[in-house]
Amino acid sequence: MFWTVTTTLLEGFAETLKLFALTLAFSLPFGLIISFGSMSKLKPLKWLVRTFVWIIRGTPLMLQLIVIYYGPGLIAGWAQEMVMQTGEANSFIMWLTEWKVLDRFAAALLAFVINYACYFSEIYRGGIESISKGQYEACQVLGMSKTQAFVHVVFIQVIKRIIPPMSNEIITLVKDTSLARIISVYEIIWSGESFMKSDGLLWPLFYTGAFYLVACGLLTVLFNKLEKKMDYFRS
């Protein structure tokens, strides 16, 4: 029974790692783009981005998962009902009727990417704004453009400064993947819970904790080594 449970949990953990890895791959660069928008000199863009970040950070991830998965289908149903009742529809209403429900995993991935990109954007913003303007000015004196100064001088220092808060968010992401089960995404908690429902066994659910502990432990060691490697950048 132990090996059966372990095999099943490994299958669920593979989906957890898949969601984790894809979320990081998309949210890290997306978060950097959002941070540029939140620091833009164009005030309408700046406040639009900051309002979006405020909404995402201020609402539960579980709610965002539900809205992203069920929302399109509900909107399409409402639009179709409106067409049936009135017999008329403009191009916008017809476009809404064609909205399709996302695949469960795709909906979970989209929700996680948007949520974590917003959190990462604030970490990026804090790191970028912590660099003194004198460094940009020194780079300009050396004939470097603002882009070159950011890429070759500033960004590497930003990475060093954001590793601690970024590592905390990434470790949190490992555990937050369990929320995907709210829209029936097959992941490790779902796997462990299935034995409780079918066989009345509680220990497989606790066993899932060992997988999270190992994953978080490995990430902690990795980030500690990365911090030490970046120690040659003295603030």
Image: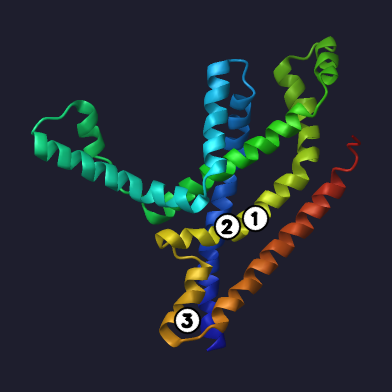
Give percent across and percent down for residue 76: 25, 42
* Local secondary structure at mark 1: helix
Task: Tell whether label 1 touches label 2 (CB within 8 Å).
Answer: yes
Earlier in the chain: of badge 1 and badge 3, it is 1
Residue type at numbered disc 1: Thr
* Local secondary structure at mark 2: helix
Circle number at residue 115: none
Closest to the observer, 107 or 139: 107
Residue at horizontal 32 percent and vertical 44 percent from the top: 72
Circle number at residue 176: 2
The Cα–Cα distance between marks 2 and 3, rounded to whole angstroms, is 21 Å
Q: Which residue is mark 3?
A: 196
Task: Tell whether label 3 touches label 2 (CB within 8 Å).
Answer: no
Q: Which residue ends up furthest to the left in the rendered image? A: 87
Q: Quadrant of residue 123?
A: top right
* Local secondary structure at mark 3: helix
Q: Which residue is mark 1?
A: 172
Give percent across and percent down for residue 69: 38, 50
Q: Quadrant of residue 115?
A: top right
Q: Is there any visible trace of residue 26 in the rendered image?
A: no
Q: Local crowd at mark 3 within 10 Å, few (<14), some, or many (≥20)? A: some
Residue type at numbered disc 2: Asp
Q: Which residue ends up furthest to the bottom in the rendered image? A: 1
The Cα–Cα distance between marks 1 and 3, rounded to whole angstroms, is 25 Å
